Every structure is written in structure tokens, then in C-alpha cells.
Image (cartoon, grey):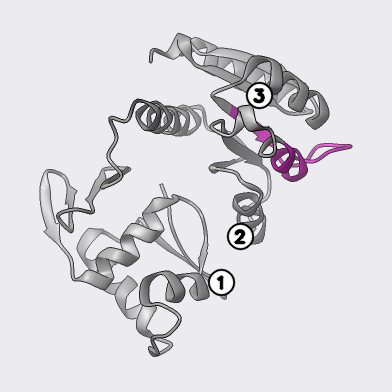
Amino acid sequence: MNANEYIILLVDDEPDILEFVSYNLRKEGYQVFTENNGKSAIETSKKILPHLIILDVMMPEMDGMETCQELKKVPSLQNSIIIFLTARSEDYSQMAGFDAGADDYISKPIKPALLLSRVKALLRRYSSSLSGSESDSMIEVGDIVIDKERYVIIRAEQEIVLPKKEFELLTLLASKPNKVFTREEIFSKVWGNNVVVGDRTIDVHVRKLREKIGIEYIKTVKGVGYKFEV
């Protein structure tokens, strides 16, 4: 799909943000609609069926979290991608956003280049998943491609072979960029609840991954877990 075929709904109670973000999106060719509160956003979404919704977290009456949860209940909007705009940098806010059903988040103040990069990546994933051209065996994040069938990753045109658990850990984290995975989630999904491993097992695997793919991707969230940051 071309940019002008994508419909984006921008929801924020700050007029300056609406003007700034919508200008940058329209300049790229996207069809952009705007609303300034959660309730009207839900009604507009039902009418225009946006491919992507950019949703402010802190709004009066109905905040972004509640709006997101309500949007996810609408059958015709099940495929709509939701990005949160948030002035908060706390990890608990990010985790709550993903739990509410968001696909990504962008922190304020908004950097246009980052915003457009995230939007393009998410819409490309949306388009590929609908067309069936994207295989479930491939994950592409940043400059890393994860080939789940061959158990290799590709970065800068170089293939890197990882041990099974390192590969599974990286695949889990990269499956939802910027989502904070708790240590409990990681243990359960990578090692399984019935496997007893030491407390430092995850840390050792993360250290080895950083040595192989670079330290900039996997971030530690103290007291919580890890995330793959793009």
C-alpha cells in the first residue's frame, strides 16, 4: 500500500500536538484525522476504520489507557495499530500501555524523524501481515532480521548463529519492541515453568546477546526485566 492509502487517527487534547504531528504525517502522504478526546476518538474510529491510531495517554474524561481498551473491544478495529504518546518515561506506564493493548509508544517531546520511522515500520508490518507476504518465521526490527526457521540472525549482512536459549530470548524480546518483559515472563516463555534455573541465568544470556549483537538494543529495566529498544 502507498502512504496515501493509509488512514491515521491522531488523538490528543493539546492543539499544538495535533497540529504538529498531523502536519508531519500529512507531509508524508498519510490521510490524517484528528480528535481531542477518547470518546469522540472511539466514534470516529468506527466510521473511518483507521489503519493506525496515535493516542495520547493523559487526556481528561477518558484517558488513553481506557480508550485503547475500548477500541480493542470493537470487532472492526481488531487490526488497527495503536501507538501511545506519553510524557511519562516511567517503565510502569509503558508496561500498562502494552497491557492495555498498545503496539508501541513514543515519548514526548516528539521527534518527527522517530515518529515517522515508527509509523512506517508498524504500517509495513500491518500491510505485510494482511497480504500474507510476511512469514511468521521472520522478525525484522531495526537493522536486525531474525530468521526463526534457520535459527540465525542477520545484521549488517552478516549471519550470526546463536545458541538455542539465546536465540529464543532475543526472539521473545524482539517480538514486541519496547515492551518491558518481566523476569517471570521471560523464565516462563523461554525456559518454561517446570524448569528450575538460577536467578542469574537471564542476566548471563542477556550479557552474551549484547556481546554478539551490540549493547544498544537490549535495555535493563531495574527491578522489572528487559526490553528490546528501537
Sequence-first disc among 2 and 1: 2
**Residue 66 x %, y %:** 77, 43
229 shown above or below 41: below
Are the residues at dot 3 and dot 1 in contact (C-beta closer than 8 Å)? no
- The residue carrying mark 2 is 91
- Relative side of 66 to 78, left or right: right
Which marked residue is nearer to the observer: mark 2 or mark 3?
3
Q: Secondary structure at mark 3?
A: strand
Q: How many marks?
A: 3
**Residue 205 x %, y %:** 30, 75
Are the residues at dot 2 and dot 3 in contact (C-beta closer than 8 Å)? no
The amino acid type of the residue labelled 1 equals Val
Q: Secondary structure at mark 2?
A: helix
CA gap, disc 2 to disc 1? 9 Å
Image quadrant in which you'd find residue 3: top left
Check the image and name the residue furthest to the right.
61
Local crowd size for mark 3, using a 10 Å CA cut-off: few (<14), some (14–19), many (≥20): many
Q: Secondary structure at mark 1?
A: loop
Numbered tag placed on residue 168 in the rendering: none
In reply to whether residue 69 is colored magenta, the answer given is yes
27 shown above or below 143: above
Numbered tag placed on residue 10 in the rendering: 3
**Residue 16 x %, y %:** 72, 22
Name the foreground residue: 145 vs 91. 145
Are the residues at dot 2 and dot 1 in contact (C-beta closer than 8 Å)? yes
Image quadrant in which you'd find residue 108: top right
The amino acid type of the residue labelled 3 equals Leu
Look at the image and give the residue range highlighted in magenta.
Answer: 53-70
In reply to whether residue 46 is colored magenta, the answer given is no
Name the foreground residue: 110 vs 54. 54
- The residue carrying mark 1 is 224
The amino acid type of the residue labelled 2 equals Asp
